[in-house]
Amino acid sequence: MADRRNASAAPTATGAGVLRPEEFARHVHLERFDCAVELSRWVENYWLLRWDLPEGTSFVSSTLPHPACTLSVEHGHRRSGVEDPVVVTGVVTRRFDVTARDRAWVLGVKFRPGGFASLTGSNARELRDTTTPARTLLPATTTDALADLGPHLDRHAAGRAVDRLLAELPRSPDPDYDTVLEVVSAMLEDRDLVRVGQVEERCAIGTRRLQRLFERYVGVSPKWVLARYRIHDAVTELDQGYDGSLADLAARYGWFDQAHFTREFTDLVGVPPRTYQNG
């Protein structure tokens, strides 16, 4: 069995994700687990969704966008206009809603920001806000084997299978991707970084080079990533029961005033922060 990445591996994603996680857990079973160590340079984690809802019922789950591409195997659930069971979803720039109904099994690979582009040679900007059959981006032997995975496998067996298939893809040194990872890690590590200029100074990188790297590898701008991470921080605090002043929360994560914070929060989450805070 391949070694699993240990819990101390540096993350390149916030812990935010599904909105209203307690309500979500009443309808959908979610498991997150690690990839093999040798893949952890490109992969953040794996996840497995399962649901089995009574006939005629449904549940809409809403997820905050992350600056990452996802490879998923979907049985019992199909994206609109895509028939293939194995798909690649580029960075989604808005809240991501999925309607769960009937019975489904969905296995996902969440790549690190820039990880899919580095591993496959694709351009992340071209994948932004799209869901694409994986066979157009990965070898047919890989996608065919992924399509054979399904509910007959538990997460351990499914994880080992994905490890093996991804490990077969060619890999090579990619110093530009290393730079992207360094920048993203700094954004997460230092919550005092609230403007891109601060990130550039911290990482000793010029504006044009940073923009070019994020366009190619991540698919969105450094400003977008930084703003999303700070909203993720705010949502996580609200999910954990924060009952303080929204003005204080906004100031903590870099907004100059509560009105600006409220606008950006509402645009992304779908409701104002006070409404979300009050449940």
Image (spheres, grey):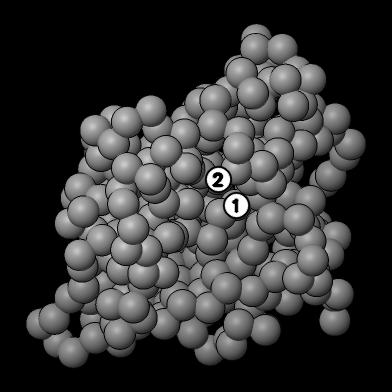
**Residue 205 located left or right of residue 210:** right
Residue at left offset 70%, top offset 70%:
34
Instruction: Tell me the number on the disc at residue 13.
Output: 1
Residue at left offset 25%, top offset 39%:
262
- Tell which circle, 2 or 1, labels the residue nearer the N-terminal end: 1
Q: Residues within 10 Å of mark 1 (few under 14, many from 20)?
A: many
Residue positioned most to the right:
173
Report which quarter residue 231 is drawn in. top left
The alpha-carbon separation of the residues under discs 2 and 1 comes to 9 Å
Say which of marks 2 and 1 sits in front.
Answer: 1
Please name the amino acid that badge 2 sits on.
Ala
Residue at left offset 60%, top offset 37%:
192
Name the quarter where the N terminus is drawn: bottom right
Query: Do callouts 2 and 1 mark residues in contact (Cβ within 8 Å)?
Result: yes
User: Residue 212 appears at what percent x and percent y?
Assistant: 64, 17
Q: Secondary structure at mark 1?
A: loop
Name the quarter where the C terminus is drawn: bottom left
Q: Compare residues 6 and 41 and report the one nearer the observer.
A: 6
Q: Judge whether 256 appears above or below 43 on screen.
A: above
Q: Residues within 10 Å of mark 2 (few under 14, many from 20)?
A: many
Report which quarter residue 24 is drawn in. bottom left
Q: Secondary structure at mark 2?
A: loop
Residue corresponding to mark 2: 68
Residue positioned most to the left:
56
Please name the amino acid that badge 1 sits on.
Ala
